[in-house]
Amino acid sequence: MTQIFAYIPHKNGAAEDVALEYPEAAKKIDAGASVTAVVTGSGADLDKVAGDMAKIYSEVIKVDNAALAYPNAEVVRKALTAILPANAIVLVAHDTFGMDLAPGLSVKLDSAYAADAIDFEGVDGDALKLVRQELGGAVSTHVTTDISAGAVITIRPGAFAPVDGGSASGTITDKSGDAGDLAAKRTFIEVVEAEVGDVDITKSDVLVSIGRGIEDEDNIEIAQELADAMGAVVSCSRPIVDAKWLEKSRQVGTSGQTVKPKVYMAMGISGSFQHMGGVKGNPFIVAVNKNPKAPIFQVADVGIVEDILDFMPELQEAIEDL
Amino acid sequence: MEILVCVKRVPDTAENEFELNSDGNDLDRDDLVYSVNEWDNYAVEEAIQIVDKVGGSVTVVTVGDDEAEEVLRREMAMGANNGVLLADDAFEGSDGKGIATILKAEIEKGSYDLILTGAQADEGAGQVGGMLAAMLDYPYASLVNKIEVDGDAKIKVGREIEGGNQEMNEIELPCVLSIQTGINEPRYVGIRGIRKVAKVEIPEKDAGALGIDASAVGEAGAKTKRVDYFVPDMGDGAEMLEGSTDEIIEQLIEKLKAKGGL
Ligand SMILES: Cc1cc2nc3c(=O)[nH]c(=O)nc-3n(C[C@H](O)[C@H](O)[C@H](O)COP(=O)(O)OP(=O)(O)OC[C@H]3O[C@@H](n4cnc5c(N)ncnc54)[C@H](O)[C@@H]3O)c2cc1C
Ligand SMILES: Cc1cc2nc3c(=O)[nH]c(=O)nc-3n(C[C@H](O)[C@H](O)[C@H](O)COP(=O)(O)OP(=O)(O)OC[C@H]3O[C@@H](n4cnc5c(N)ncnc54)[C@H](O)[C@@H]3O)c2cc1C
């Protein structure tokens, strides 16, 4: 029987949402697999999360150590390498912590590695077939990975249907004693919180959100004028912030703000999962993009193939004439 | 400080519309425009800025074919001092671990204090840096958006984590860091810059020169393999508004009114 281990990320005593998504991913790998939740951390927070996980998973492993109080990937990797059986199939979230942990973990476990899976199509012999995306979501691929000597696989948060909170009474096994030497060459110092900006994009019901399609800093004014006409606020994708054209506080996405507007106008945004990961609450999404194949059209409600630099002023005028 | 930056030649997402070939199993690669992976430009810029401050040199390396040489030249035009091309038919079909294994062999031939990669490349895996570090037994930090060099033994690095918060760490040298966009503003490279380095000799190394066992890399060593490209079932997808711009705007305004956008 396939044995799958799911690494549970958590913060302040609460597991991240992906904890509810691993069971579905595991089922798609092998419907008969046994799935064990693995929780590392320290003290009361850890016990709280391990307890919560025992309501969802029949087996929970916890590793308690002061060195694991903050999730330092090097330390977690050492602990996991010590406690996991050879040939383990390990699921990790493809988030900022998972990207830090998983590739190196696969080297230390001497197992196969596959990143950012969005679907699984079962196992054929030793080969697990999975679906992932390349080129910022522009194309999809099938990938096989040989799991006979184990595998580390990261899954995209939000890609698998969550299970209910659950009422199982799983067993919690304490493997703290097996974690071994956790000394690391990287030490965590502190978390510096993101700066608060001039406007709070999370408070606006309507967002005119611009991406790399705006092409030039001077063109931001065009979006601002449309936003003014709509009573909306201008937000943006990451490249606009990287170029220092707008403040970080205007960035929508996993490494920016999570917004829950009623209407989201994606202007010249391709629709990468890191961007769309910040758009929550099922808003009405309008996408304007000059590329009819842009991935944003897969998630938008309404799509328009136009040049935003021409389209936005015309839309603004029409709205002002109402 | 001796810095090695790993760079990859990738199809440019801004310049291409991606289509499948007639067999429907690969990209139609005939007219693709390639460039340096976006993240790698930030890594090279950061390396140059560090060397400007504390001295040393920047070497750029890529695993690829002859055409990959152009990306090395571009990064040298930015200011990298040396370039190395790792190329061999035996490297064909390498997975992420294969690429990391090849890069490791080159790194062990030099003596680098700092190795930089991009946070991710065209395939969106973000795997090579972390693998490389683990293979070398160097410490690693991913998604780095700040580097403070204040000594020879240790440096301070900021990692970008969820919500745009920054996680500060101290990390021992030598180490591997994967660089996130936005850490700096990569300098512009003009035609003249490229011309200046057009004739610089770029050494090329094959599996033999690197001392790599060919069965550990390439197709033979790959546990993870791409089977095909495909167009996913888009489900409902967006309702595409058609007609003249005026007609589109008229339809859009009706919808925006209904949904609370106006
Ligand atoms: C760990 C990590 C975290 C990240 N976090 C975030 C995040 O929080 N937020 C975020 O946005 N990104 C984030 N990214 C980056 C993300 O992967 C994408 O690179 C980014 O979202 C792309 O932004 P874009 O859509 O504006 O640009 P592109 O992908 O370059 O798309 C530009 C689009 O504009 C269209 N276009 C161009 N010109 C015009 C025109 N004149 N008219 C109409 N359309 C036009 C093009 O067809 C294209 O579809 C993150 C990446 C990583 C690795
Ligand atoms: C010659 C060659 C042949 C290949 N053949 C196949 C094939 O047949 N089938 C298949 O599925 N895939 C093939 N690949 C793709 C290969 O699997 C990927 O290059 C590998 O997985 C790493 O790419 P990534 O986009 O996942 O990198 P990521 O891990 O996302 O990239 C992160 C960083 O790693 C570094 N990096 C990545 N790749 C390279 C590189 N090549 N050289 C130097 N630094 C790099 C860069 O700094 C980059 O920013 C081939 C690649 C090469 C170079």
Image (cartoon, rainbow, N blue to C red):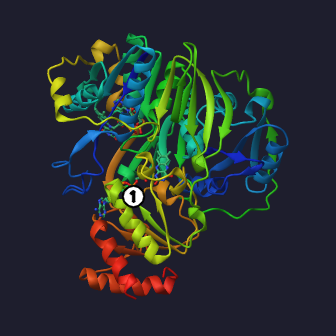
Q: Left or right? Give the position of B99 relative to A233.
A: left
Asked whether the viewer can see residue B3, the reply is yes
Q: Left or right? Give the position of A296 relative to A73.
A: left
- Does any atom of ligand 1 lie closer than 8 Å to the CB of label 1? yes
- Percent x, y for residue A145? 45, 42
Which residue is more in the foreground, B102 or B59? Answer: B59
**Residue B241 to residue A125: above or below:** below
What is the chain identity of the residue bearing mark 1? A
In the picture, residue B232 is in which quadrant? bottom left
At label 1, the amino acid type is Gly
Which residue is more in the foreground, B262 or A282? Answer: B262
Residue occupying the point 80% across, 28% down: A177
In the picture, residue B92 is in which quadrant? top left
Q: Left or right? Give the position of B98 relative to A249.
A: left
Quadrant where the N terminus of chain B is found in the figure: top left
In the picture, residue A90 is in which quadrant? top right
Residue occupying the point 56% across, 59% down: A160
Query: Which quadrant of the picture is home to ligand 2?
Result: top left
Q: Mark 1 points at which residue?
A: A211
**Residue A71 to residue A107: above or below:** below
**Residue A307 to residue A61: above or below:** below
- Percent x, y for residue B48? 38, 24
Q: How many labels does the image show?
A: 1
Residue occupying the point 79% across, 47% down: A50
Q: What element carries label 1?
A: loop
Which residue is more in the foreground, B147 or A38? Answer: B147
Which residue is more in the foreground, B70 or B257? Answer: B257
